[in-house]
Image (cartoon, helix red, strand yellow):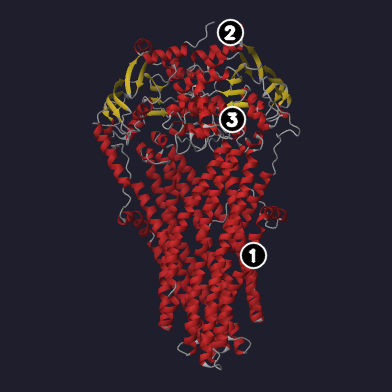
Amino acid sequence: MRDFGYSEKGQSVTVADLALWRRILRYSADYRLPIGVAVILSLGVTGATLGLPYLLKTAIDGYITADQLAMEQRLAGITTIGLWFAALIAVNFLLMFTQVVLLEWVGQSVMHRIRQELFAHIVNLDLSFLTRQPVGRLVTRLTNDVQNMHEMFTSVLVTLFNDILRIFGILIVLLVLNSKLGGIMSLYVPLAFVMTWVFSQMAREKFRAIRAQLSRINTYIQESVSGIAIIQLFNAQSRFARDFLNLSDEYLRRTLSQIRLFAAFMPLSELLSTTAIAIILWFGGSLILKNQLTIGELVAFLAYMRLFFQPLRELSQKYSIVQSALASAERIFAMLDVKPLIVDPPRPQHLKEIAGRIEFAEVRFSYDGTTPILDCVSLTVEPGETVAIVGATGSGKTTLINLLLRFYEPQKGRISIDGVTIDQLPLAELRGHVGVILQDVFILKDTLLANIVLDSGRGRDEVRTILRHTGIDRFVRRLPDGLDTIIGEAGRELSTGEKQLLSFARALCRNPPILVLDEATASIDSESESILEEAIATSFADRTSIVIAHRLSTIRRADHIIVMEQGVIVEAGPHEQLMVNRGRYAELIELDLHNDRPKTIATS
Amino acid sequence: MQRVAQQRSTSAETRSSETTTPLSSLLPLLVPQFKRHRVRLAVGFAALLIVDLLQLSIPQLLKRGIDGLSAGTATPSMLALLGLAIVAIAVLVVLLRFVWRTLIIGFSRYLERALRNRVFSHILTMDQHFFSSRSTGSIMAHVTNDLTAVQMACGMGMVAAADALVMSVAAIGFMLYISPSLTFFALLPMPILAIATRVLSAQLHHRFNTVQEQFGVLTEFARSALVAVKLSKAYTLERLQTGEFDKMGRTYVDANIKVARIQGVLFPAATLIGNMGLLAIVVFGGRLAIDETISMGDFVAFITYLQMLIWPMMAVGWVANLFQRGATSLRRIYLLLDAEPLLPDHQENTVSHITAPSFTLQGLSFTYPGTSSPQLEDISIEVSQGLIVGIAGRTGSGKSTFCKILVRLHDIADGAYHFGGIDVNQLPLDEVRNRIAYVSQEPVLFSDTIGANISFGRADANSSEIEQAARDAVLHDDIMGFDNGYQTIIGERGVTLSGGQRQRLALARALLSDRPVLVIDDGLSAVDTQTEHRILATLRERFNEKTVFIVSNRIKLLSMTDIILIFDRGRLVNSGSHEELLAANDFYRAMHEKQMNSEPRD
């Protein structure tokens, strides 16, 4: 009782969608040769399978019931048949094995290629598209949907080809052996197909209902386990147990209904094959009486019909798998058809020696096109200057950085580095010039060194020097194996502060002329904080830097402070001047800074 | 005293490490279900038996027809009669198969439900020690994979075993009756099939697990890469990540091909062995038919019996694996159900006369089971009703553990903690817990409406009470900002709340539960200062009879409490009012200076 394929809502693909098939086949074009071999193997397997009952017939008619022949002749004949028989089954086995492994290899290779293409495609899509997609959905495209297609490729398409080849091969043999009896037997084909189709439709619904309920149960258990302390402290155990009983009962109801469906349908295919035996005996027997059929042929009919019904039992399952695989293929292709809007310029300019002058000129931006996030923002950061951006959540601080890195394009206005508009630079070059230090960090399951270096090509000694220079080596020395400590999953977990330090080290490895720091809003341990302060002091000194600041120490270090409010710059200037002005900045500092947790302002 | 708690935990540890639980101790998990459904099972197996016998009679009818045909004694009416008899049997088989499938496989689902419910209600009674030694994932595995394995063993496994046994014994019986020597030759390859299925399908299972693991690795990588896609772009890591993904994908492909190699042997093997038997029948049976030791009908019936044997032979290997897996899973379920909470729960000592919930802690020490250094050491303090107690200290100083002990989540030694004058180890858990509302730093919310989450501790609360609690926790305006107000669903399929909103929701939940004690374990850390002050003011005014413990490192908040406890490395180093601590405690003074001196001078 295998699963009837993974499915998602909104499937509307038909198996007869030719354009879809063509596109799927394009991916297998490079494997034409192995696929051709597999088809030949299929023919071989079918031939060998169908040869066996024929040998049986020859044995019976030619030797066993051939009273007219001499005894030795009959016995020798049987031995010869036996040798042929042995040869066929050995060949059959070898061909089948080769075919299974060959097809698995082709299928896996094709799927690997699709998966890679999809992955490379997705990570290059616009952030504006990606942030609108739930991560789970994107992951499903890469994993389950590709897996689904693979299922179809290897275990279904080819066995389906084998099966159909076998079914029609058998029909032809039967019709040749005896057209009347063969004709009657061929009526089983439409009968079996209709039954299978009806069954597969019904089974799919049942499976879907069961899966939905099972995931409800699993979610419930998961939530209960992670919230167990609260459940117990608020004395809700009996309520949870009761609700769970209901979920469990519903699951039982659904599985029982599926069992009944299977119990009704599974024996039906058995009924078909048994009635075939009855018909062969009855109708075939009467043909023998009329001398229109031999006993050997009758036995061959029995054997062929047994082979005939074998594939039909799994047909419904395979049909469902093909259907869900096509739906997956369609979803994958739809994803591949999404084109990024933010791409490299056709005739890119290049910046050789970067001074680091950043200019935002009357920039206007909105994520959804209606709610303005930045409204006519103009600001200039001179080379080597440090600018701190201060403001409440939603004031547009992070958006400025998103635009500078060209994650989004401003609706109006112009952003330039050293006078060159950023959309004239290749994306990789632009992002290479601007080193960003974020509080989130992507961690490879590898050593700290590998995580710092990534693809920057730096050697261990270079990294050491950079870390020593900025004081981040104090963080490294805290780890058990220093730079060789394995971090990430199953390794050492990093705290918020340590993540920010790692992010810092990464950015510095690329030696970017411009640094952008998004300070952690969460409280970080005091030691990380002091390392971070030193790193900021040493690395900001000679670079153009922008910092979204939450800590007073960082704000005070800045040459320039920009106060943002609802997408507009409301104040700008050095700390002392702004304090004297007693405007919004002074207000913010007094309001939040006085009473807030250590040296933090403007958090969400 | 401390030793008492330790011993309790180590005995539980050794129990769960026993991997070889005797099968006899597992059976009580299943037996009651078998007893309860005995009629269902009896009817089911009777139907199964009859189906097998009916099926075995078909070759006999076939033999009679063919013998008649080869001897020339057959008549059209005889053939028609035989054909009809076969059809009649087939119809009966369909009906009876429906019966046993629904009854026996249905039984396995009833059994599964009973076990699942039992596991779940057991989990609900377990304490922190249990959950700290098991990941959510492993518990999930128990309720999903292990239950499925047991269900399969008790459903399809049992059916296949009975079916295979009856079919093979009877078919071999008929074959022996026709010709013992031919039976020997025809069955010679059969044991190979049984063994091959057993060995290969176990291997297959193993290799398939590797595939699943690698699939998990692939999924996890894709997920983590896509969650941080902004970072990848900022650092232009797209190519690097695609390369990593490619490596993992290749490993996955290799693992799959290893599976295919076994499948490539296993699936054709059944055909191969069946055909080898057929070969034996053609060669030896052919000879016997030629010298007329057996009739032509016997020859054909023999072939049919052989074909009937192929499935049972495959089933033997398959069933053995199913049973083995089922037993392993059942053992794991047993160990889960066998685990007992360490926390003593003296239900019999219900004393509802605790009116003033006072706390007396005397020499309280606590070490997490399985660790060596104590998390809390020698804490003594007395807190009477109505006080607001602030708790401060560095990360890892034991504040959180202290709160969890107060609300009775951790097992402690006798005599260290008196609640309302009575040793908590002598009280029912509920007696203490029902008087304390708890707000943790990482609030746990459930995928349900906001309203339902607030009324979590008091399911009978009406909407105005819920709203009042939300107002007290300064959450009402936030809620009204959502399209569906209090009916807004939160969680995976609903609205995502900010950290501060989550914390305030947890606070509203605690306030509505209307318990005399409130423990806030750094539960306002993500709430901004102004809101925090409003909340504390509300607590002072509207809930002034409540005893409140509040963990925080914000000086401003701590200065509003009645008494402040300073923890350091598991010890209570100082306690006193804000002013007292400023004079007496270095850490507190340093914290005060750092937070207050960052005030820019005007």
Residue at 32% across, 18% down = B573
> What subunit carries mark 3?
B
Q: Which residue is mark 1?
A: A39
Tag 2: Cα neighbours inside 10 Å, few (<14), some, or many (≥20)? few
Whether residue A1 is visible here, answered yes or no, is: no
The Cα–Cα distance between marks 1 and 2, rounded to whole angstroms, is 81 Å
Residue at 33% across, 28% down = B375
Of A209 and A169, the residue lying toward us: A169
Disc 2, SS: helix
- The reply to whether the C-beta atoms of the residues labelled 1 and 2 are less than 8 Å apart is no
Of A555 and B446, the residue lying toward us: A555
Q: Are marks 3 and 2 on the same chain?
A: no
Q: Point out the image quarter for the C terminus of chain B.
A: top right
In the depicted structure, whether residue A395 falls above or below residue B489? above
**Mark whose residue sits in front, 3 or 2:** 2
Disc 3, SS: loop
Q: Give left or right: position of B206 versus A100.
A: left
Three-letter code, disc 1: Val
